[in-house]
Image (tube, coloured by chain):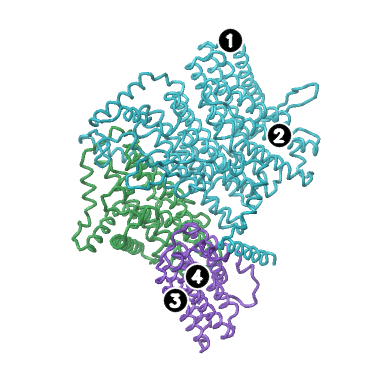
Amino acid sequence: MIISIFHLLLCWLGSPLLLGVIQRTKAKLAGRQGPPLLQNYYDLWKLMHKGAVFSDSTTILFRLAPGISLASLLTASLLLPFGQSEAVISFAGDFILFVALLALSRLMMIIAALDTGSAFEGMGASRDIIIAMLTEPTLMLTVATLANVASKSGFSPTGLEKEFLSLSLFHTAITLETWSQSGIVLLLLLMPLSVILLAENARMPFVDPSTHLELTMVHEVMVLDHSGPDLGLIQYAQMIKFWLLGSLFIGLSVPFRTTVPLLDTGIDFIAMIGLAIAIGIIESSSARIRWQHFPQLLISAMMLALMAFVLGLEGIIYK
Amino acid sequence: MISFTVGVSLWFCTILLMTMVILLAKRIHCLLMQAMVGLWLAGSLFILPVLALTILTGEPLKFSLNILPILDLQAEFELNPVNSFFLLPVCLLAPFLLLSLVGYVERKRFIGVENWLILSFLATILAILVVLLSQNAIVFLMAWEWMTLSAYVLIVLSVKLDKEVTPTWSFLAYGQISGLSLMILFLTMYAENHSYSFGVWHKNTQLRAALSHHLIYLCVLIAFGAKCGLFPMHHWLPITYKLGHGICPALFSGIMSNLGIYGFLFFTTMLGSPPSWYLWALMILGLISGLWGIASSFRTTTLRGVLSFSSMENFGLMVLLIGLSFYAVEIHLPKLQIFSLVSLMILLISHSVSKVILFLGVSWVEEQTGKSKLDQLGGWMKKSPWIAGLMFLAVINLVGLPPFCHFLGEYLLVVSAFEAIQIVSGVGNSLLLAIVVIMVMISTLNSAAMSRMFGISFLGVDRSTSKDSTSKDTNSKDSQNIEESISESFISQYSEKKSTIWISIPLYFISAFLVILSLLLPILLNQFLNIIYYFSGSLVDGDFMRILGQAQDLLVKLFVVNILFLILIGIIFGFRTWVLKTKTIAKGPTWDCGFAQPEARMQYTSGSYIEPFSNLAGPLIGIQKEISPILEAFPERKPRLRLKYNDITIEYMLAPLILSLQYLAKRAKKLQNGRLNMYVLYIGITILVLLAWVIVSN
Amino acid sequence: MNRVIDFSLLALVLSTIWMMGSSRLITGIRVLIFHGYIFAYLTLILGEGTIDLRIGFIALFNWMTKSWLVPHLLIRAMRRTEIRAEHKPILSYLTSIVLSVIIFSFSLWLLAPERLHFRQRLPSNIFLPTAMFLILCGLLLIIARSNALMQVIGYLTLENGVILTGLVLARDEPLLLEMGILIDILGVVFIMGIVIFHIGRTFESIGVEQLTLLKDD
């Protein structure tokens, strides 16, 4: 339990660092010095000390949205297993709550964007919702496949009832043994999961976070009118979201478990940093795909997840 | 026991009394009307403890009346936990609806029809009560017809007051289809049992001929499917919900269509041993109407349109849950059965409550502006933050997001389906996976549809201001000008603001009920035990309690997370206010990347908001984009973009029967088209079918 | 051993799906080259450790035709007609991808091990489904694309499926037969390449809709 709370704190405090790692990697690859690793912390600190400007056309929802969005992501982080231990709260089907909390956070940001009455933010909202439409079923399919793999692996972690499928159960059930049993299915799952990771966090092949052309943005364009502490809350929420989806990815792809809890935490944390570096490399080496090609890529990811599910059913798992 | 009888009969007496009074009074005095509404409210409050007691104790209360002494028709009634549960929304919501109806009538000051309007409302409610309570086929059928007719009268009268639209026959037609199939069902059952009593039918479930067994279930499917807008029978829903005052759709969606769900539950339990095709039809049609309903809402451009399709989606899900719960009995999964029943109850009550809130709010907006299209509204959140804010709560609830109770229902459905995937194999497995995936799709589509409805019409800037600025030939001196015009329109609308108390009081009460329900549902779940027990008589008591305990555990954990969520929100807002306390908070126009002021015309419209989706799935759901091509470098004609919405199901499913033969002939002719690719396709299909046939038949 | 075979089969499936979703001809050709490598590899390892001269020769010949000769011819045809991509597919790429995954699930369901009764155990549960998938995807490509070169690619994919079936079901088929099939393919592609080149030069398009103009009247 204590180590779970430690992981929670790690998530809440460490997530700005990951974004810093991405920025640093991109800068290094472009031959620049880049901002210091802790730059995001300074930014948040600075934003918290600023005043705010609110548009005349906005209502109370605009002021509420960043806080609710952040609160729902923080609540989602309570459900997230990390390292060796399970999450702070885990119960059957907590992944449904996890997905719903992500959806709530997104919906609040969309509502805030529409509240400004701005054309750009309307565009961002309309794009964000279609991305959500195409990624959430994929996420559910991925989880369904994981449930299959976890229940077929014959592995019952201690302290968790096997009939209750939860994120923590999946996390602890994915070991080297599971990988050797059903590695093909899991490998197939990593592809849609990485697409979800990049699309939901609005990273590079989908959205270019560093450009200042509004027409190419999704998340950034939705927050054009937020300022001061609200903007800080939103940025922090985005970092938390990156951590949430990133650690799902890491939980699936890094199955190494030792008997020392802190060592596992360390391994997973290093893997998270590795993921951030990988994303930095992807961002500096790839071009943004055209908006028209978004659905094709996302639906392909959905189809891959479906394939993984079907393969998992049809006994490609070795005993 | 005696107190129950007295209570129920007293309530009936109140309603009858009110009916009489309304009939007698030529022109209703305001005071008299208020007194009547007060009487009704008192009656409802009186009946609520009776319902609650029935649900808690689980003892059915039976009484019978000799209605037609000549025919010796003994009309039996029964108040059991199930129909008490279905009576709950009626007793809770109908008084508030009546309250706003009275307010509406008084505001408009119609002469002549107001008595009839209120009378038809009361008659509808009374018919609903009789349908729910009756245990006799003839009384049931009579009340069913009576309900359809009085609801139709209510629409017609209400439409007559507006004098804008003509009433439609589709509601009546579908109502009659429903009544007709009920009649066939009852006659068939009478031929089998020589009795009209449901109790007798329930006892003789084994003695039925196979043919009539299938026939009666087909009749059940059509009768109640038509009532709650199941997929191929949903066309009346969006058409009817557009008519009349907003109270009519609130009544239909929040109270009346629930009877379809009740009918499915009650008749499937009573008639016993449902055939498996019927269960599969319920599940698949439910899934389709869920998905189709919510996807179709992108085709509508009115507030009511979106809400009506959302109703279709929710009723689809409920029908799915009914099918699933009986299917679970067939495949011996008690957990799936109980979870889906609990989920059904949660969805039903939460849908009723939030639909009534939304339709009342919409009716208020329509009354204030006279506009109902999404693209003509905008900025209503600023003009009346409270009503719009309450509607926002209902929207979040309907999308199925925590911490509201709709989410709890969907959660229980998905989690039980998920666990069943691991156990069931074969076709059932694919079905359960489809349920899980489609549920997620429905929920994301729902968030798109609802954010579209709420965001376009309630947020942003009022779109009606943009017309003025364009017609005034905008030399637009500066942003100041537009700002002035906005505030002018603001004032003008505020000055003619009417009394909102008739809308706001019901809204406050119902929203409070929604919030309380969402928060306390996990704790209250055990009180619903008797309702679920009614359907799962085949289970061992220990099993039943254990599974219900599991559901309770899960909901309590969700409750804990919800509380943590609310605490986190509190902390963050405390922090935010503390941080902002000493800082300057400025006000300005929307920044919008340098455009000085977001003119209302620049905002995203209902069409453009879902443009990415309609690009992707437009042909599937009937959204066509027409663009006039730009041919020369400096086109003289302005390029035009037009979105065409057409209902595919009307086009393809309701096409006249006479034309279908011709259509088939045309199709057959098309096979011979002289295109190489198509011929290879035929070869491919033939080989595939042959291969599948050979392998499967072996 | 099983895992390696499964993995190669999955690579076949994924690369075919990639081909279905791509408009460029060169992608299709590259996927075919990749298929050739996998086939050669599968031929080698399906011998279960005993690599004799015959199997080695078949693998080599497989690789030569599928990864070298045929793609070479195709690329040459593509260069000479100067048509690099499919412009107006009859089915959109997205639909093709969705359809191909449906086809894959269907073949998995249809050819599930408990449904088939073979005397010998197959090396992998997804061997026959993959073969059927390749055949059906080849058909789908021929149906869904209007570019003649793309149709040739579809035909070759179909042929690959047939060969995959042969690999597992008729493990001891005569060398002569195997080579006969491969030479057949070679001949077909050779002729098609020439024909397509000439059609492309005459009609400035290799869309099969326009082939109706070739009829005599």
Q: Where's residue B268, x and y in %? A: 68, 41
Residue under pointer 4: C152
Q: State how far apart marks 4 and 1 are (Cα).
A: 85 Å
Question: What hue represents chain C?
Answer: purple
Q: State how far apart marks 2 and 3 are (Cα).
A: 70 Å
**Mark 4 or 1, which is nearer the eye?**
4
Towards the viewer: A36 or A1: A36
Q: Amino acid at mark 1?
A: Lys
Disc 1, SS: loop
**Mark 2 or 4, which is nearer the eye?**
4
Q: Amino acid at mark 4?
A: Val
Q: Amino acid at mark 3?
A: Leu
Residues at marks 1 and 3 touching, judged by CB atoms closer than 8 Å? no
> Which sits earlier in the primary sequence, circle 4 or circle 3?
3
Q: State how far apart marks 1 and 3 are (Cα).
A: 94 Å
Answer with the quarter of the image where residue B4 lies.
top right
Towards the viewer: B554 or C23: C23
Disc 4, SS: helix
Letter of the chain in cyan: B
Question: What hue represents chain A?
Answer: green
Residue under pointer 2: B180
Q: Where's residue A307, x and y in %? A: 50, 62
The image shows residue A85, relative to residue B509, as above or below, that is below
Q: State how far apart marks 1 and 2 are (Cα).
A: 37 Å
Q: Tell which residue pokes out farthest to the front in this image.
A: C217
